[in-house]
Image (cartoon, helix red, strand yellow):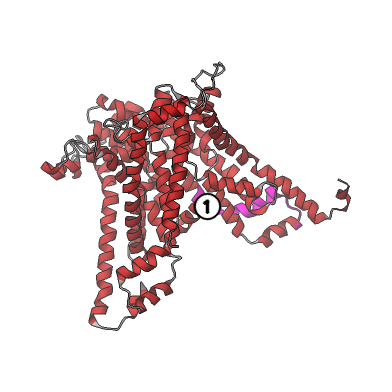
Amino acid sequence: MSGSLRTPDTAAARRRPARRRALQYTVLSLGAVAFLFPFYYMIVGSLRATTTGDLSSAVPSGLTGDSYTAVNGAISLGRSLLNSGIMTIGVLLCTLVFGLLAGYALAQLHFRGRGTLFASLLLVQMVPFQLLMLPLYVLVVRDYGLGDNYLGMILPFAVNSTAVFLFRQFFLQMPQSLFEAARIDGAGELRILLRIALPMARPAVLTALLLTFIGPWNEFLWPFLVTKDADMQPLAVSLASFLSNLQGTVANPTGALLAGACVLAAPAVALFLLFQRHFTSTDIDSGVKG
Amino acid sequence: MTMNLRVTPASRHGRARSRTGQLFVTPYVLFLLAVFAVPLGYTVWISFHRFYFTAPGTHVDSPWVGLSNYRDVFTDPVVGRAFLNIVIFLVINVPLTVVLSLVLASALNAKIRFRAFFRAAYYLPYITASVALVAVWQFLFGSDGFVNHLLGSHAPDPSWLVNSDLAMPMIAFFVTWKQLGFFVMLYLAALQNVGKELYEAASVDGAGRVRQFLSVTVPGVRPATTLVVIYAVITGANLFSEPYLLTGGGGPDHASASPVLLMYQKGIEQGHPDFAAALGVVLVGFVLVISLAARKLTERGN
């Protein structure tokens, strides 16, 4: 890329970078429009008094919050958001506590079966969760009776293997001398993890939390299987049931649906924008590489 | 263990650390057993038995039926259609994802203004819930939707999501769009590993922009491409929300059904978990075969 800057200094060659830059911006902007337009449409559609498919509906006019009230009346947003929140926080807590312990052990402690465990961690990341849905459903809902129960919703996601991997990579990179010094001073491993490793691992923890958050928050299939009671359904599930069979109950069904979609999308998008600069491509790369 | 007497303080420490290590990973190991190993084994077991759902605490016999569930799976034409649909999905999704994300990542890799904005824009669909995005797409591509108003008399009839030729491609496009940002980031990271000197050497040899892209960039990010393909296969095998919500239960007439959707419909809605379990086992085999084949293909000539 930088190579072309070194070509002979002719007028044509000098013009080339400018043309290339224009091309780059065109490509990037076209991409951005394709990615952002549905979001724009979602917000505008959710705020209009009547939301129809014709072209004028892309223009914000006569904005009102009626659709939010309508969808709230049909699926009780507060309750659904609470359920989503409990499920997500449960998953995050388990991932953080058990994931940090496992990640630290895999990176710093030698024990029998460590190699096997690490190999299975990589394998697990490749197994599509949906393939396990049926036996999990039989076990969790039928055998343990955990249908319509937060524990049942959290269980399959309780420890995020990608997060364990991320923690392990981070603890491997930390200077070994630090740990040795603490051990010579007689500190136990749990103490070392909490007092030395964890404070330094803040960036890894943040990345893992963000990566983990979108999983349970956006998850549809599992809570859909586990919850029959509308009062227990997270927002993704209640919004889907609104999409497939409750739309007739409100005056502006499309607007109400888009309003629900905005509410479902907002927390994940807000968190991402807030922490965007901590969320670099290299983290994703190492989280995925396996 | 008389050796214990001669153990030096350092290795006694080592043994304590070994025990601590095992203690630390115990919850994770239990989780892996409960959520992966046991269910995987259980699926295989169910697939060879006549299996019924029971209420907690009650017991019903599950007689061994050999390959009968598998025979049902292989003779069901809808199952064949669902696997064909994954192939359609992959044929559209893989090339589109590789080309678009590589082009966008290359453009983003230059020193460019608003980089953070572009990155965020591409990443937005990836972090947003499928259910929310499906709602917008239904609205955009519905019979009376925005896109059809835009196309006027050129709009397809029947419309996008209820057209048996277009329903599955629509799902493939939706998923490509939703996941693209993730792969842009993946390629962006991979591009950091392609040596600058390779570009300089190529440019000295007189290679133009396009030539450089094809003979330096594309081979340079090959490991990432392999990952894209494997991810696409896993995504295809996992498809559920999109056929269920975007095309109203895999319609029209199963033209957009996926194996997982069938597992749900047959297993849970219609109460044949044994059929669904056999289908799941077949699906795992399918994923393994396609992933291995894809890996061979993308790594050829490396």
The magenta-colored residue range is A184-208
Tag 1 secondary structure: loop
Viewer-closest of B267 and A147: B267
Image coords of residue A68 (percent x, y): 30, 34
Name the image quarter holding the N terminus of chain B.
Answer: top right
Three-letter amino acid code at the position of disc 1: Gly
Q: Which residue in the structure is indicated by mark 1? A: A290
Residue B68 placement, left or right of B100 = right
Would you say the magenta stretch is mainly helix, strand or loop? Answer: helix
Image coords of residue B164 (percent x, y): 24, 36
Q: In which quadrant of the rendered view does residue B269 lie?
A: top left
Q: Residue furthest left?
A: B153
Where A280 falls versus B16 (above or below)? below
Q: Is residue A85 visible?
A: no
Q: In which quadrant of the rendered view does residue B40 lie?
A: top right
Q: Is residue B45 visible?
A: yes
Name the image quarter holding the C terminus of chain B.
Answer: bottom left
Crowd band around label 1 with a 10 angstrom C-alpha radius: few (<14), some (14–19), many (20+) = some
How many marks can you see?
Answer: 1
Residue B96 placement, left or right of A196 = left
**Residue in the image at 38% along x and 27% along y:** B265
**Residue in the image at 32% along x and 38% along y:** A261
Viewer-closest of A119 and B79: B79
Chain identity of mark 1: A
Residue B73 placement, left or right of A11 = right
- Residue A187 lies in the magenta-colored region: yes
**Residue in the image at 49% along x and 42% along y:** A127
Image coords of residue A219 (percent x, y): 42, 37
Viewer-closest of B301 and A74: B301
Image coords of residue B211 (percent x, y): 32, 69
